[in-house]
Amino acid sequence: MDAARTSRRGIVASLHSLLIRRLVVMTAVICVVLGGAAYLHQLARYDEAIIEYSLAGAEDFRALILPQLDAAAPLGPEEGGRIQQVLDALPSEGRTASRLGFTASVRILDGQARPVARRAATNYRLAREVAAYFDARPYAFRPGQAVQSSRLVSIGGRPHLHLAVSLADSQGRVAAYAESIYAVSGRVLEDVAAGALRTVGLVVLVALAATLLLYPVIVRLLRRVTRLSVHLQEANLETLRVLGSAIAKRDSDTDRHNYRVTIYSVRLAEALGLPDASIRPLVKGAMLHDVGKIGIRDAVLLKPGALTDGEYHEMQEHVQHGRDIVSQAGWLADAMDVVGCHHERYDGGGYDRGLAGAAIPLAARIFTVADVFDALTSRRPYKEPYPLGEAMRLLELERGTRFDPAVFDAFRGIAKDLYEGVSDCDEGALKEALGAIFRRYFTSDLEAMLQGMEDIVSGRRSPRPPAMPQS
């Protein structure tokens, strides 16, 4: 009971942790995506204002140098010098420019995209980086073609606008180009960041509100799915038990043989330290190991005397029949190792594939020991049960020939307990022990999860397990 309570508490904590982790990750991703989108959107709004301001400035500058633009094509040194004088004489940006930013560098090019004048804000802390950017990534003007372009670039880790515009003469012909790098002001960046943070905060609030609304719905849906999974697993296990019973009836045997060999196999697997994932297929295979006998004729299967060579060969075919049967059900497919290999011998002398050593699946090597042990120690119509000592002596004779030595050695250590605790049990006790195995390896986790979700939905808290006594 304490273990079950501890398991339920662990399930509840695990569910809470899983949902919270998913929420945090999902919220973080949404915040990054929407925050980044909000940042770019806010910056784009300022970009439009900067571009509008810059184009107006370019038009004013064009009016100042229009005589030079009309004088010659392309611009000569004299026109270039005059344009440089006009550029140098321009006042610094006014109030609007200081709010949005400032022109960090500008250059004028003639109609063939050759530089003729340049001006830079030498007191700008990134002046060197801007100059290097200008030299390394100039705009690709096409001589004679009108252009109006802007793109957001990062220089020195700070956003800048790279602007390019054509300058026409009085006849509307492209006579020169202006290219500039505009440094966005710190105030603009602060406004953009604040807008992005507001968006992120709103996303977090919406995510938390959605979680509070959806959390109980999700848990209830998980509870419903888990309950269906438990019922389905129980139905599968009941079908497994009934099918094993049908096989036993077909072979004039009782359910007890299937129950005992399954219990023996599981205990041996546990002694060998096999993980749960390896024991579950072993349970299925042990319950259905002789399922192929359904395909054997009664005259052979139920013959009281010795079988002829032909009949013995026909009896061996039950292994292949078993493979054919379990391969048709996905849930039973992993029972194939036991169903298809439980008559193989460690020395390679078994049937129907003649496998040897490690080529025989471990589950089949485990089951073979359990099956022969039960055959020796149980009462059959043609024999009385052997005492434990005699049964172990006979098994010992086939160590390394029929049985895997390592598997047999592990079985030797638990044989006495199994013999005393299982071999003489009635069908009811065996059925109860088998049910415990089913719960342990197939449904306990699902049941604990279901109970944990019931606790979450109802608001109950699983009782704490009692504290261990202090030594």
Image: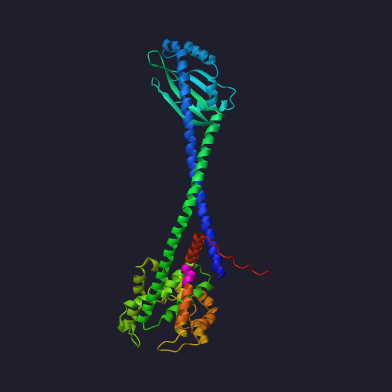
Q: Is residue 295 visible?
A: yes
Residue 355 against residue 191 in the figure, above or below: below
Colouring scheme applied when the structure was drawn? rainbow
Q: Which sits in the foreground, 247 or 75?
A: 247
Residue 311 against residue 151 in the figure, above or below: below
Q: Is residue 442 magenta?
A: yes
* Picture quadrant of residue 156: top right
* Picture quadrant of residue 427: bottom left
Measuring from the top left, give residue 113's x and y in whole percent.
44, 20
Measuring from the top left, give residue 429's x and y in whole percent.
48, 80
Measuring from the top left, give residue 252's x and y in whole percent.
36, 84
Look at the image and give the residue range highlighted in magenta.
Answer: 438-444
Q: Which sits in the foreground, 101 or 75?
A: 101
Residue, x 53% and y 56% (percent of image)?
Answer: 17
Measuring from the top left, give residue 239's x and y in whole percent.
38, 72
Residue, x 64% and y 68% (percent of image)?
Answer: 468
Residue 415 against residue 133 in the figure, above or below: below
Q: Is residue 332 magenta?
A: no
